């Protein structure tokens, strides 16, 4: 009689290997994750339920409706016209170029349709949202990611190319650039608050001899988001730099040599030889950063308190405020679940891109 | 010999253990900031952080069998942290709380109601509390804490700059505006005579700007609630905001300064008036005495009446115990003895600039002779607060954001007030 697959020696040893991970994963990640989703279907006041467990009320999808829906919803062509035009035009152009170069591909068509659905349909929706603040923090978070991710990637790539050489100087600079990565968000924000200080900040002191008054970096509507984005770029460029250095060292030396002999120098060498050679590293760095920076919290909480107004308030900070200031943990859990869904999309894209390249 | 040594060591260990068992440890949560080396000499301490910590340290040093551990907490996230501790069933044994938070915590059963008999047994006489103080700790007819102060917004004044602008009377008091028009006129006089801003305050971070607008609403006999209705978008609110905007538009004040920057600007002689609370009176008084600080002649004035009715924003600091302490009689008794110690040191806490809560302290010579006390004696009579609400902090945050969006982002006043009203209606 054959033993069932569950009882086979290989299966048992397999379970034995993953057991240590499962012991941590199930109670610390999986259970809280599903409990969070369950809480999001309730009107659940954190303090009230602590003292009276029956104080929670099952309300189904009401939290999600309050977040995502509104009254008098309609569709407008003129909402965010320039942004939507650029995104729609860009998506169509890149799709057309890809079809010209590599022919029809179902995955590309799905991506194009998804982008068009967002830019044409979703971004055209207007009305009295039940929670307009939610859309403000979503927009701010997307803007933050849109500034930080390309800037960090480009800066880290250029630094990696410059520092990808032997010698003590390059090694020292590599260590220096990586140094910021080991600091915690509290230390990073403290350092940059000292830099941005209007009265005695580092930048203010640099400007003082020229009789230039320091801008209000953190309380000026037009500067605050840029200021916390710059702080984040400074903080996260080290990690991307190390990944790019690892990628660059995988490029065969003869390929670069051949390219140089063929007359490829400067930007041409960068765009036609180096970037295509490490494209998987570039994709990995960008998607990792997108997922990471959608969870931005400390910079907004500690440097600007989301202000001025709500101009630097971000998704996770709104979750935090709803849960721990307002005690509305059901509503906060619904927001967290939506953030998870949003980041899942990017993780699926990364998985899909990696799998396609492997095949 | 060895046996003797071992038995002595054992005896010493047992003695230490029995002393350790007799010690009751209280975990205490507070804001007010950090004070390095506060010591136990309460009379030598200056500023909120050092005075409160020296009161705590001196209680800790007493031979009373109680040890107090002060938890590291920061003002910005204090209530978030406190709520998380309560939700994690790990609440501190004693903690400071504002009057405006009592409704939220007491309504959920988080706070321990303190019977008057228990307070009296511990040496606290609730009959000595001023009526407003008793009201501050009361919820549904029960007492939920021991009051420590009233605090309110004042106008902190650089008399040197006011003198230069001709805004000091024969009695040596500052001449303050009695209408929005006069406010702008005084601001113009200061600017022309000295070149510095007339007024500064934190309009960009903490809700000091909200408290200014609230005071101006109360001065016009309106409030943000009228019964069950939210009344934020009103002609009175527009007038209050326009009054503040007239200072920004005229170049007499800057909206971008946060708490620290506005305070530094005032101490550096870059603004004639700073709107801030009672909690900094002794600090500014000490700073003004320093040779390297531009502020020399400091005066703490009542918030002026710009509209019909005198009013200024006010609140109270109280000390409460979690309801779970009822199951630990020793800790409850220790916590009550600590509250009694705080109650006994009401005069020391009042040195910060806060108003005392005990009638016996208010009437004492020691209190009456505190620096600047006579200059803002009327504040106690004009102190106002928003109606109690379990969503107070969320409502305050909405007002702070929408008001900031007016003066920092150029949002239309009417639209901002309408948005604030709509959101407060949604969340309350």
Image (cartoon, coloured by chain):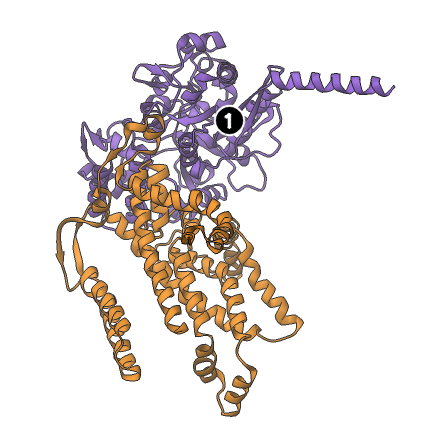
Chain colours: A orange, B purple
Nearer-the-camera pick, B325 or B211:
B325
Q: Horizontal and vertical percent for residue A318?
A: 33, 46
Q: Compared with residue B350, is residue A111 higher up or lower down, i.e. above or below?
A: below
* Horizontal side, residue A297 vs residue A64: left or right: right
Question: Residue at the location (45% across, 77% down)?
Answer: A275
Classify mark 1: helix, strand or loop.
strand
| A167 horizontally vs A94: left or right | right
Q: Which chain is indicated by disc 1?
A: B
- Image: A126 above or below B324: below
Label 1 CA crowd tier, 10 Å (few <14, some 14–19, many 20+): many
Q: Nearer the viewer, residue A246 or B418?
A: A246
Question: Residue lying furthest front in this view?
Answer: A1
x, y percentage for residue B388? 29, 26
- From the viewer's perspective, is residue B75 above or below residue B123? below
- Name the residue located 64 percent from the left edge and 71 percent from the top edge: A169
Question: Which quadrant is home to the C terminus of chain A?
Answer: bottom left
Q: Is residue B144 above or below residue B244?
A: above
Residue in front for this viewpoint, B196 or A157? A157
Residue on which the image places disc 1? B28
């Amino acid at each position: 009689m054959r033993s069932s697959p569950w009882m086979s020696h290989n299966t048992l040893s397999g379970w034995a290997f993953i057991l240590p991970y499962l012991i941590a994963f199930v109670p610390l990640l999986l259970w809280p994750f599903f409990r969070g989703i369950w809480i999001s279907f309730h009107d659940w006041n954190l303090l009230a339920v602590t003292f009276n467990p029956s104080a929670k009320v099952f309300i189904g999808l009401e939290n999600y409706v309050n977040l995502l829906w509104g009254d008098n919803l309609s569709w407008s062509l003129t909402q965010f016209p320039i942004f939507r035009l650029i995104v729609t035009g860009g998506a169509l152009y890149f799709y057309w170029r890809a079809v010209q170069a590599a022919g029809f591909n179902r995955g590309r068509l799905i991506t194009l349709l998804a982008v068009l659905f967002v830019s044409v349909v979703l971004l055209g929706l207007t009305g009295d949202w039940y929670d307009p603040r939610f859309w403000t923090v979503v927009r701010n978070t997307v803007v933050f990611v849109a500034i930080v991710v390309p800037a960090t990637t480009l800066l880290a790539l250029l630094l990696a190319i410059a520092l990808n050489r032997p010698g003590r100087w390059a090694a020292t600079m590599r260590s220096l650039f990586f140094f910021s990565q080991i600091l915690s968000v509290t230390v990073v924000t403290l350092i940059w608050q000292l830099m941005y200080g209007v009265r005695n900040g580092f930048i203010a002191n640099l400007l003082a001899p020229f009789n230039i008054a320091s801008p209000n970096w953190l309380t000026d509507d037009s500067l605050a988001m840029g200021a916390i984005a710059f702080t984040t770029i400074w903080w996260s460029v080290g990690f991307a730099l190390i990944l790019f250095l690892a990628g660059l060292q995988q490029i065969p030396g003869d390929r670069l040599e051949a390219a140089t002999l063929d007359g490829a120098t400067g930007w041409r060498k960068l765009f036609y030889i180096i970037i295509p050679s490490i494209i998987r590293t570039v994709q990995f760095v960008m998607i990792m950063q997108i997922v990471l920076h959608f969870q931005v919290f400390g910079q907004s909480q500690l440097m600007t308190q989301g202000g001025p107004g709500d101009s630097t308030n971000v998704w996770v900070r709104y979750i935090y405020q709803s849960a721990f200031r307002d005690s509305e943990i059901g509503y906060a859990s619904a927001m967290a679940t939506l953030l998870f869904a949003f980041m899942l999309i990017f993780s699926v894209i990364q998985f899909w891109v990696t799998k396609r390249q492997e095949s | 010999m060895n046996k003797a040594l071992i038995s002595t060591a054992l005896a010493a260990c047992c003695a230490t253990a029995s002393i350790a068992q007799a010690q009751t440890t209280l975990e205490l949560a507070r804001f007010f900031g950090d004070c390095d080396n506060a010591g136990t000499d309460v009379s030598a301490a200056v500023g909120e952080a050092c005075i409160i910590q020296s009161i705590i340290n001196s209680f800790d040093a007493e031979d009373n069998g109680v040890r107090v551990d002060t938890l590291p907490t920061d003002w910005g996230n204090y209530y978030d942290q406190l709520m998380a501790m309560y939700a994690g069933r790990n609440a501190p044994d004693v903690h400071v709380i504002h009057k405006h938070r009592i409704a939220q915590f007491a309504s959920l059963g988080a706070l321990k109601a303190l019977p008057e008999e228990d307070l009296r047994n511990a040496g606290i006489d609730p009959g000595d509390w001023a009526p407003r103080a008793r009201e501050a700790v009361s919820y549904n007819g029960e007492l939920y804490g021991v009051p420590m102060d009233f605090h309110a917004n004042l106008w902190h004044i650089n008399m040197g700059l006011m003198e230069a602008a001709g805004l000091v009377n024969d009695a040596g008091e500052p001449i303050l505006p009695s209408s929005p028009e006069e406010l702008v006129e005084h601001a113009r006089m200061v600017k022309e005579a000295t070149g510095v801003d007339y007024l500064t305050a934190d309009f960009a971070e903490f809700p000091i700007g909200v408290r200014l607008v609230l005071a101006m609403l109360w001065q016009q006999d309106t409030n943000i609630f009228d019964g069950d209705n939210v009344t934020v978008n009103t002609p009175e609110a527009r007038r209050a905001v326009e009054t503040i905007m007239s200072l920004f538009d005229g170049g007499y004040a800057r909206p971008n300064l946060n708490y620290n920057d506005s305070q530094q600007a005032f101490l550096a002689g870059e603004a004639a008036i700073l709107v801030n609370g009672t909690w900094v009176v002794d600090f500014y008084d000490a700073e003004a005495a320093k040779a390297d600080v531009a502020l020399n002649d400091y005066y703490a004035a009542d918030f002026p009446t710009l509209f019909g009715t005198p009013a200024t924003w006010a609140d109270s600091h109280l000390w409460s115990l979690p309801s779970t302490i009822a199951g630990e009689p020793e800790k409850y008794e220790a916590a009550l003895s600590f509250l009694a110690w705080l109650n006994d040191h009401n005069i020391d806490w009042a040195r910060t600039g806060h108003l005392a809560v005990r009638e016996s302290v208010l009437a004492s010579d020691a209190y009456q002779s505190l620096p600047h006390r006579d200059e803002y004696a009327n504040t106690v009579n004009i102190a106002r607060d928003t109606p109690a609400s379990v969503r107070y902090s969320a409502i305050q945050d909405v007002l702070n954001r929408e008001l900031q969006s007016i003066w920092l982002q150029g949002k239309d006043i009417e639209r901002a007030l309408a948005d604030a009203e709509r959101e407060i209606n949604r969340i309350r």
